[in-house]
Image (spheres, helix red, strand yellow):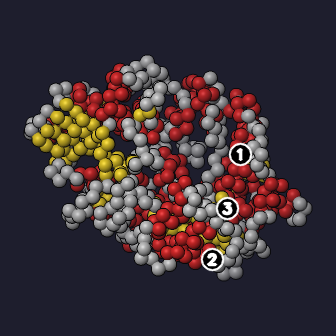
């Protein structure tokens, strides 16, 4: 039997880009996407959701064998019964192979159920394809519906005399958890062969399952549409023809010629930019060099920050930054202080074309902004998680949990101190109430301006606000609600409940986008890119933090570092401060690039590695020593994020003073 099967995971990969089928099994090609299934399980609660789904079918029989032939034999034996429920059924047709999450047989009728940790609520429109012309599967549902479509296609071919109904089973955000501690009844572990598995508690009760937080969505209409109406490969192939096309190329290890697009931005077959000596090949570079003669390290229009016209330009044969003109970007001001988005994009393009490595700071407008700030300045950063299965009774799935914050203060005289922090390491406990009380106590020490980086903190304060409103037994409820109103602005779900608070947090991310650009940021505005760039530029920061005074007795207060020196050099370059820290996962290579590729949902991506680490502490078997080490590492990482915010402001302030001749 040929073991080069086109599986459903390979099909999903091909739906992202069919050329990836050639790279995916070859160790000589770099693959930035983590292949650690354990990490995937933690990332989006997928394994726990799958195990909960199985609990809804107590008569189900699991096919445990990982051997393809054995699994197929066991599946076929069970399908001889007139009625049976099978978990992980193995089905083969020619070279197409699938393992179904749940397959139910009732006489000549098969029900296919694919379980996903994707959420759905009353605002999601059904069907999952648009009815306007041209019809199409909605973007956010494409990966899931195509997954089911491939499985149904294989089932149709393998069992042509059966009627087949197709469902997605997803997380119902309108439901509520029936009991306390439900998510702790699904523990993630590894077996003796290193494979991930979830252990369902034997204590799972009728009450635990009395209200289903997973919902079946019939996708038969969507799949009929895919089979009969959709076209693939530049609108030249039906679904069946496309599957055969992919199968033939994968089976014979023939590379499918690439068609470039914005989706290439998320290609995992790139070499790690931090490993310049890597001997691995880049599939991304091979594709782009084939189509547009891209040279090694040459930048493409995909590198332009948040450039929404990229797809249209690629269709016109414009691939490289040096092909971009001002007409493509239209760098006009928008009437607001600082750079408009298009002005900033044009700034990036010009600096690349002109080989200009200098940074740009909008000094006048930033100075006006700074004049509105009130000292001492407060800098906060939250670490959060969104578990699919709630911690407590009556909570909704994917209710946000804020388990950690860091808080730095910058005084007007330049004194910096890591003033306070919070971390919840209690297993199975919703930390939000303790979190918001601790944050209130920390920020009420003065009336100074508060800073966040990106909308994340504001979003979570709104989530906690909504959770508090539903609880009547909290003695300080009104005080906590008033505190949240005072430092935030309402999100869409809270429009009209309050106006922008008098101490509404200033978004430093917005200020970076309006007032600062540095080529070293590589088109990114992530604090993980901005901080190292600004540190390498600022002589002021290098002098202030060039000695081990951070966390020293007579230096700067730190709650997690002792006698730490932030300015360290390697080959005459300042080392990225984040690289000085011990990794959160000593057994996993988890770069920021891998985090971006790991999460399907941008909301879950917030906090990235920290949310995965928290999930690891909550849901896996871990010794107290391991737990303590991970907690210490998380405290340091969060502290660095708020220190980075402090240093960015310090560097800007120094540049402004220098421009005024005050230094």
CA–CA distance in space, label 2 to label 3: 16 Å
Q: Residue at x 27, y 51 (%)?
A: 53
Name the residue tied to disc 3.
506
Q: Residue at x 58, y 44 (%)?
A: 273
Q: Residue at x 75, y 43 (%)?
A: 334
CA–CA distance in space, label 1 to label 3: 24 Å
Element under disc 1: helix
Direction from residue 496 to residue 519 in the image, left or right: right
Is the residue 287 above or below the residue 333 in the image? above
Residue 602 position within the rendered picture, expressed as x and y whole percent measured from the top left: 50, 49
CA–CA distance in space, label 1 to label 2: 38 Å
Is the residue 314 above or below the residue 454 in the image? above
Residue 98 position within the rendered picture, expressed as x and y whole percent measured from the top left: 27, 36
Residue 341 picture quarter: top right
Q: Which mark is residue 519?
A: 1
Q: Earlier in the sequence, mark 1 or mark 3?
A: 3
Residue lying at the far front in this picture: please name it. 496
Residue 305 position within the rendered picture, expressed as x and y whole percent measured from the top left: 65, 42
Element under disc 2: loop
Name the image quarter holding the N terminus.
top left
Let me know if residue 481 appears in the view. yes
Q: Earlier in the sequence, mark 1 or mark 2?
A: 2
Element under disc 3: strand
Name the residue tied to disc 2.
444
């Amino acid at each position: 039997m040929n073991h080069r099967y086109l599986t459903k995971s390979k099909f999903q990969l091909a739906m992202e880009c069919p050329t990836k089928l050639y790279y995916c099994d070859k160790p000589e090609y770099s693959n930035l996407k983590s292949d650690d299934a354990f990490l995937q399980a933690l990332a989006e609660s997928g394994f726990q959701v799958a195990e909960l789904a199985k609990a809804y079918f107590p008569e189900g029989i699991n096919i445990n064998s990982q051997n393809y032939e054995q699994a197929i034999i066991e599946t076929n034996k069970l399908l001889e019964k007139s009625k049976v429920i099978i978990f992980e059924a193995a089905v083969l047709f020619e070279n197409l192979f699938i393992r179904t999450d749940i397959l139910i047989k009732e006489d000549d009728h098969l029900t296919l159920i694919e379980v996903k940790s994707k959420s759905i609520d009353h605002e999601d429109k059904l069907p999952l394809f648009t009815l306007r012309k041209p019809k199409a599967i909605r973007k956010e549902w494409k990966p899931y519906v195509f997954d089911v479509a491939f499985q149904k296609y294989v089932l149709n071919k393998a069992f042509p005399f059966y009627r087949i109904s197709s469902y997605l089973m997803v997380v119902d955000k309108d439901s509520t958890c029936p009991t306390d501690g439900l998510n702790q009844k699904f523990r993630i572990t590894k077996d003796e062969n290193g494979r991930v598995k979830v252990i369902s508690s034997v204590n799972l009760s009728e009450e635990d399952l009395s209200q289903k937080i997973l919902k079946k969505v019939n996708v038969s209409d969507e799949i009929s549409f895919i089979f009969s109406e959709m076209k693939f490969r530049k609108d030249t192939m039906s679904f069946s023809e496309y599957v055969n096309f992919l199968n033939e190329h994968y089976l014979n290890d023939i590379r499918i010629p690439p068609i470039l697009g914005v989706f290439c931005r998320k290609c995992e077959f790139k070499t790690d930019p931090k490993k310049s000596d890597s001997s691995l090949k880049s599939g991304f570079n091979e594709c782009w060099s084939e189509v547009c003669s891209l040279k090694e390290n040459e930048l493409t229009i995909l590198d332009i920050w948040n450039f929404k016209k990229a797809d249209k330009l690629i269709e016109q044969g414009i691939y490289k930054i040096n092909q971009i003109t001002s007409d493509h970007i239209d760098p006009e001001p928008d009437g607001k202080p600082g750079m408009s988005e298009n002005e900033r994009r044009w700034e990036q393009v010009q600096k690349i074309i002109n080989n200009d490595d200098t940074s740009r700071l909008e000094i006048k407008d930033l100075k006006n902004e700074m004049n509105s700030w009130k000292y001492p300045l407060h800098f906060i950063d939250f670490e959060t998680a969104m578990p699919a299965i709630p911690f407590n009774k009556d909570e909704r799935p994917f209710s946000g949990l804020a388990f950690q914050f860091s808080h730095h203060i910058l005084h007007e005289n330049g004194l910096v101190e890591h003033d306070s922090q919070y971390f919840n390491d209690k297993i199975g406990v919703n930390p939000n109430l303790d979190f918001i009380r601790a944050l209130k106590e920390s920020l009420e020490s003065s009336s100074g301006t508060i800073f966040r980086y990106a909308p994340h903190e504001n979003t979570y304060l709104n989530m906690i606000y909504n959770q508090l409103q539903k609880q009547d037994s909290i003695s300080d409820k009104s005080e906590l609600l008033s505190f949240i109103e005072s430092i935030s602005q309402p999100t869409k779900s809270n429009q009209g409940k309050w106006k922008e608070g008098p101490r509404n947090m200033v978004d430093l991310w917005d200020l970076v986008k309006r007032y600062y650009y540095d080529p070293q940021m590589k088109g990114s505005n992530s604090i993980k890119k901005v901080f190292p760039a600004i540190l390498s530029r600022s002589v002021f920061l290098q002098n202030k933090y060039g000695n081990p005074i951070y966390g020293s007795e007579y230096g700067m207060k730190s709650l997690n570092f002792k006698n730490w020196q932030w300015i360290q050099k390697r080959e005459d370059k300042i080392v990225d401060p984040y690289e000085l820290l011990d990794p959160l996962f000593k057994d996993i290579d988890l770069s920021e690039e891998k985090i971006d590729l790991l999460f399907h949902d941008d909301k879950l991506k917030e906090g990235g590695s920290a949310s995965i680490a928290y999930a690891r502490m909550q849901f896996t078997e871990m010794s107290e020593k391991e737990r303590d080490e991970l907690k210490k590492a998380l405290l340091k990482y969060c502290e660095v994020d708020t220190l980075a915010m402090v240093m960015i402001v310090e560097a800007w302030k120094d540049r402004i003073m220098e421009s005024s001749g005050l230094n």
